[in-house]
Image (cartoon, rainbow, N blue to C red):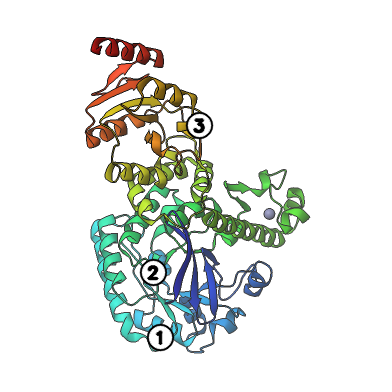
Amino acid sequence: MCFEVKERDLCGRIGVLKTRRGNIETPYVMPVVNPIRNIIEPSELKSEFGFNMIITNSYIIWKHYKDNIKDVHEITKFDGPIMTDSGAYQLLVYGDIEVSNKEIIEYQEKIGSDIGVILDVPTGAHASREEAEYTVMETIRRAKESISYRKEKDILWAGPIQGGTYLDLLEYCAKEIGKMDFHIHPLGSPTQILEEYNYSKIVDMIVTAKRVLPPERAFHLFGAGHPMMLSLAVALGCDLFDSAAYALYAKDGRYMTQNGTMRIEELKELPCCCPVCNKYSAKELMEMEKENREKLIAKHNLYKVKEEIKLIKEAIREGTLWELLEARCRSHPRLYEAFKRLSLYVDYIEENDPVVNKKVRGLFFYDETSIMRPEILRYKKRIIERYTKPKDKLILVPMPKEKPFNKSKIFKKLKKIVGDEYHICFYGDPFGIVPSELSETFPLSQFESALDNMKTWKSFAIEFIKSKEYKEVIIIGEELEGAKSLSSINDLEKYFRCKNENIS
Ligand SMILES: [Zn+2]
């Protein structure tokens, strides 16, 4: 087993990828290194930033050195694990490359890659359906044939998933390649889609592939490494990332932050405390030679990537990845749109989100997106499927401010009026319905909510009443289908007095 999951939150995980040159803790962003020339030397990536694994391109090495074969670790002067890409990206950009799948697989073995990638055929973002079908069938065929080309035992092999935005094709590709002997599955083709800020599409693509791939394999989102979107990708189950953005952005003076990208020439203040931003002012960066500036911005960008990964890992350990997502996804409307898209996949998230061994901590609810939290879905499912009502008659009252609800004044008053004849439940967002006897169960009294008047509880209340077949339902302070409505507790008191007088 080359990948071991240690901790989980939502579909995100902290794992250990075991390579022949050492273990890498995931989620992990591999800096993309050019085999020939770099603004930051690979050895610096390790010594200064602690990046213990990098990715480079075997096709560029092949073009440059051909049969004068050298070890990739020697070329890059990097002694940690190295993943090599195959030239598929060049295939996407230039349409054709001069090497075959068999040649590049054998070449990656010869140069000592620790993780190799087959020469898949990228679908890209704008392929016609016909073209997309071809890329999928050809990628599957090449994945299959690649297995017989392998000679060395201890290299990890990546089988990319193609299909692009055609989700049915993507699913088919993931199913077929998932059956084959691969260790890592990269999601192909997201680069262009990411450049267009189409994060919703990326969400669809990740979930489509992840749902059918073996969960014990590491999942790699190709070409993604901007700190602002890492938490979303991790929360959906991505373990590995690679990024050339730190260097490409620096070239254009683009300064990364967790909330987006800024232009260095427009900054008065460097809003960061990394070693670069502590040492230099924005003005000093602008006044220095271009090459120096580029290197320093690239370094800052790498610090930001690293910082975000640390934050994400800690959030997974703490069980607060959802809160991190809520904050990050507000940094760009397209990211927020992608976050809302999770409403289509709450079942997938709920299934993967751990139920046990999770720290018990309060949940925060801000707005309608918070209602998508897996804890809410899980609670509602269980209350419908597993809960047995204690009595046949029901009184619904609004959730009081005091927690736990069954210790509130309103509950005590109600108890006095209705005695043991009625089952008392609380209604409101985010839980929909809370039976009074469950009020102290997690998370029904361990939450803070700023939700106001969303009324998403109504449809759930109707479902609850129907599924439990109550004989009589009284609701206070609201109208509800199939329930007698009373406006206040005083009205309830009068109603009961009359009822009792009539009986006597
Ligand atoms: Zn900085």
Label 1's element? helix
| Dot 1 amino acid type | Glu
- Residues 166 and 216: in front is 216
Q: Pointer 2: residues within 10 angstroms few (<14), some, or many (20+)?
A: some
Indicate the quadrant where residue 41 lies: bottom right
Query: In front: 72, or 395?
Result: 395
Q: CA distance from mark 2 to mark 3?
A: 38 Å
For this view, does 501 lie left or right of residue 119? left
Q: Nearer the viewer, residue 250 or 312?
A: 312
Q: Are marks 3 and 1 in contact (CB under 8 Å)?
A: no
Residue to which mark 1 is pinned = 106
Label 2 is placed on what type of residue? Glu
* Residue matched to label 2: 216
Quarter residue 190 falls in: bottom left
The reply, left or right, for residue 361 in relation to residue 126 is right
Is residue 98 visible to us here?
Answer: yes
Q: Residue 247: image x %, image y %?
A: 59, 62
Q: Earlier in the sequence, mark 2 or mark 3?
A: 2
Q: Give the residue at mark 3.
A: 450
Q: Is residue 198 left or right of residue 284?
A: left
Query: Which numbered disc, 3 or 1, marks the residue that appears first in the sequence?
Result: 1
Instruction: Inspect the image, locate mark 3, and give the three-letter code of the amino acid beneath it.
Output: Ala
| Number of other residues with Cα within 10 Å of mark 3, as a class: few under 14, some 14 to 19, many 20 or more | few
Q: Secondary structure at mark 2?
A: loop
Residue at position x 30%, y 62% in the image: 212
Kindly state the secondary structure of the residue where label 3 is placed.
loop
Q: Percent x, y for residue 63?
A: 48, 79
Q: Real-space Cα distance between discs 3 and 1?
A: 58 Å
Q: Please tell me in which quadrant of the rendered image residue 71 appears.
A: bottom right
Report x, y in % for residue 501.
28, 10
Of all residues, the one furthest to the front in this rendering is 504
